[in-house]
């Protein structure tokens, strides 16, 4: 009989908005030929601990593998793993993904996690699963961390990177993929995929750096098109979110993907991806036109700040500049592609000045291209060697939690959402400045991604907010917040892109 491995994807989104758990499908793909597996998704069950315990007892599984990112996932994963460990002390619990990669030693202080795997997971996971089931030495499993008998954390050196074309496809047929087909601005039957691993840059607010160490491993255009074609034929999808850390690094690959998609899918197909302004600035008009023809409807880009000086301090790298962002939103208007820009506001040492600067910049952007979508984050440190921002934050009193229980507290889960991180330099007044401005600009320019928002509500929001926007008076926008609550206004990041 083939052994069974259990996978647990902790809750990360609101009910009905669940995304394909790509992280676990990626690691499941490398064992699927030799092991059975069962996926327990915290987004789809009220009691994941009970389900895990039931499945483990029924199948005799030896291993529970979880993917954990900071925020709501971590907050659910800790109590669930504690309950599972208390009920089944012999079930080995392994964590991988963003959180254990960045905070591995803290994870290993807890009794509810036995092992972690850091960075790209597929190769070390296969080796670990074989070691656990067939024997061998833990020392030989790259990227693996555990507590030694003395209680100290031991973390093996990272595994060499594996090109994505050398890895199997996600095992779509071994889970109920239909549960993950969603409805959004892109279409009525939308799935997601990840066409590359990593990003060549090292922005010092970004968690991707710890995971991929500036490597970018792309799937070939041919493989991307085959996978999309398969999902299109098998599940009848009409939209695709490409959740890569940086989809657009190679113009040649993007153009080839677009060409291949045009021949595989119909004209109603739409897609979305994430990239950098400076990279896309170098793209030719032909490539933009091809992207649009193949269904590219929206591109997410980190604009981050309204100041070139701040972009430098963020180590944004490449050739980023505020002028390029302005030129890009103008250019995308002509190609009928919606730019979706995220900003990291409230940076130390002078968060108020930083916010005001970025607000003025955002107004300029909206004048050029009112359809631009905005995501306003407040700077939330991530561990990264040599980060000036983290260094400054620490001088201002910032510390990461030292236990897993503290990380799983409500305050730290909120920190990870980057809207109200509770960091020492962002006083309540500063945070309110961002949120009040957000309420006004979202009313004056309602998002295009909320497909449920009726036209008359869009008009009402605009009419009510107009005087505030014109007079730049953002304080106390209670009437707008009340209306937004009443009509369940959804900001772009909550609609899931
Ligand atoms: C898809 C996604 C989501 C989905 C969740 C999908 C799910 N699991 O159900 C949604 C949209 C719901 C989501 C939500 C959030 N997300 Co999110 N998300 C992503 C995204 C875009 C892709 C992750 C992914 O699936 N990649 C594809 C897989 C194949 O790659 P991977 O996850 O890196 O997995 C590999 C390794 O990490 C490792 N691995 C991962 N898990 C495991 C498990 C085991 C056992 C092993 C061995 C290995 C392993 O092996 C895998 C294969 O190599 C990343 C950014 C990115 N591009 O990576 C952000 C990202 C992970 N999210 C992030 C955050 C902060 C959030 C939020 C908490 C906040 C926010 N505002 O975005 C919210 C939560 C919102 C809420 N209200 O609950 C941050 C994490 C930051 C950090 N400090 O670590 C990221 C990095 C975005 C960013 N650039 O800042 N997210």
Image: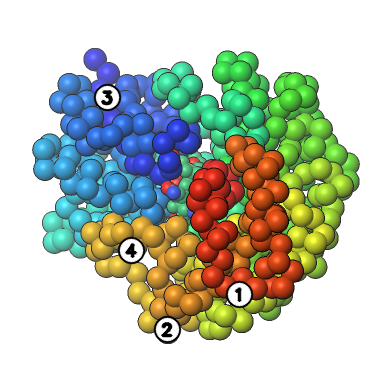
Q: Are marks 3 and 2 in contact (CB under 8 Å)?
A: no
Q: Which residue is mark 2?
A: 396
Residue 490 locus on image (x, y percent): 55, 47
Q: Which residue is mark 3?
A: 4
Tell me the quadrant of the picture where the N terminus can be found: top left
Write the residue at 43% across / 42% down: 13
Tell me the quadrant of the picture where the C terminus can be found: top right
Q: Which residue is mark 1?
A: 355
Separation of residues labelled 3 and 2 (CA atoms): 49 Å
- Name the element at disc 2: loop
Q: Is mark 2 within 8 Å of ligand 1?
A: no
Q: Is tag 4's residue or tag 1's residue first in the polypeptide sequence?
A: 1
Q: Say whether residue 247 is visible.
A: no
Closer to the camera in the image, 388 or 429: 429
Of discs 2 and 1, which sits in the foreground? 1
Residue 269 locus on image (x, y percent): 71, 27
Label ID, residue 323: none
Of discs 4 and 2, which sits in the foreground? 4
Separation of residues labelled 4 and 1 (CA atoms): 23 Å
Residue 113 locus on image (x, y percent): 23, 49
Q: Are marks 4 and 1 in contact (CB under 8 Å)?
A: no
Q: Residues within 10 Å of mark 2 (few under 14, many from 20)?
A: some
Write the residue at 41% across / 36% down: 15
Separation of residues labelled 2 and 1 (CA atoms): 18 Å
Q: Residues within 10 Å of mark 1 (few under 14, many from 20)?
A: many
Name the quadrant containing residue 424. bottom left
Q: Which residue is mark 4?
A: 411
Q: Are marks 4 and 2 in contact (CB under 8 Å)?
A: no
Residue 256 locus on image (x, y percent): 77, 34
């Amino acid at each position: 009989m083939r052994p069974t491995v259990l996978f647990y994807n902790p809750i990360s989104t609101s009910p009905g908005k669940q995304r394909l758990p790509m992280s676990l499908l990626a690691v499941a793909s490398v064992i699927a030929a030799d092991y059975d597996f069962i996926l327990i998704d915290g987004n789809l069950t009220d009691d994941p601990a009970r389900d895990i315990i039931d499945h483990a007892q029924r199948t005799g599984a030896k291993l529970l593998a979880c993917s954990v990112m900071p925020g709501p996932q971590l907050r659910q994963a800790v109590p669930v793993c504690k309950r599972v460990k208390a009920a089944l002390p012999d079930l080995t619990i392994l964590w991988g993904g963003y959180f254990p990669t960045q905070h591995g030693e803290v994870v290993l202080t807890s009794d509810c996690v036995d092992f972690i795997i850091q960075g790209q997971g597929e190769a070390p996971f296969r080796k670990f699963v074989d070691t656990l089931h067939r024997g061998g030495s833990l020392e030989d499993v790259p990227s693996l961390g555990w507590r030694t008998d003395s209680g100290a954390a031991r973390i093996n050196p990272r595994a060499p990177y594996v090109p994505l074309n050398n890895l199997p496809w996600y095992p779509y047929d071994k889970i109920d993929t239909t549960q993950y087909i969603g409805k959004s601005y892109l279409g009525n039957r939308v799935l997601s995929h990840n066409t590359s691993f990593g990003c060549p840059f090292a922005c010092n607010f970004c968690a991707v750096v710890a995971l991929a160490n500036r490597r970018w491993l792309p799937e070939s255009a041919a493989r991307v098109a085959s996978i999309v074609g398969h999902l299109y034929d098998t599940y009848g999808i009409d939209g695709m979110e490409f959740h890569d850390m940086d989809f657009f690094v190679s113009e040649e690959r993007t153009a080839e993907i677009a060409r291949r998609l045009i021949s595989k899918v119909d004209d109603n197909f739409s897609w979305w991806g994430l990239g950098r302004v400076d990279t896309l600035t170098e793209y030719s008009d032909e490539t933009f036109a091809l992207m649009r023809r193949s269904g590219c409807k929206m591109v997410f880009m980190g604009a981050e700040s309204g100041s070139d000086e701040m972009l430098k301090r963020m180590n944004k790298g490449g050739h980023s500049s505020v002028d390029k962002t302005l030129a890009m939103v103008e250019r995308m208007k002509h190609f009928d592609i919606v730019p979706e820009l995220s900003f990291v506001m409230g940076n130390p040492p002078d968060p108020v000045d930083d916010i005001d600067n970025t607000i003025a910049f955002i107004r300029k952007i909206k004048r050029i291209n009112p359809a631009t979508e905005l995501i306003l984050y407040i700077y939330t440190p991530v561990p990264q060697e040599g980060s000036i921002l983290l260094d400054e934050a620490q001088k201002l009193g910032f510390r990461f939690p030292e236990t897993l229980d503290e990380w799983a507290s409500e305050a730290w889960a909120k920190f990870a959402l980057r809207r109200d991180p509770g960091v020492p330099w962002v006083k309540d007044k500063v945070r309110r400045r961002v949120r009040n401005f957000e309420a006004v600009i979202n009313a004056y320019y309602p998002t295009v991604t909320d497909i449920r928002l009726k036209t008359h509500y869009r008009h009402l929001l605009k009419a009510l907010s107009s005087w505030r926007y014109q007079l730049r008076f953002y304080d106390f926008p209670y009437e707008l917040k009340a209306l937004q609550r009443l009509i369940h206004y959804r900001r772009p990041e909550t609609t899931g892109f």
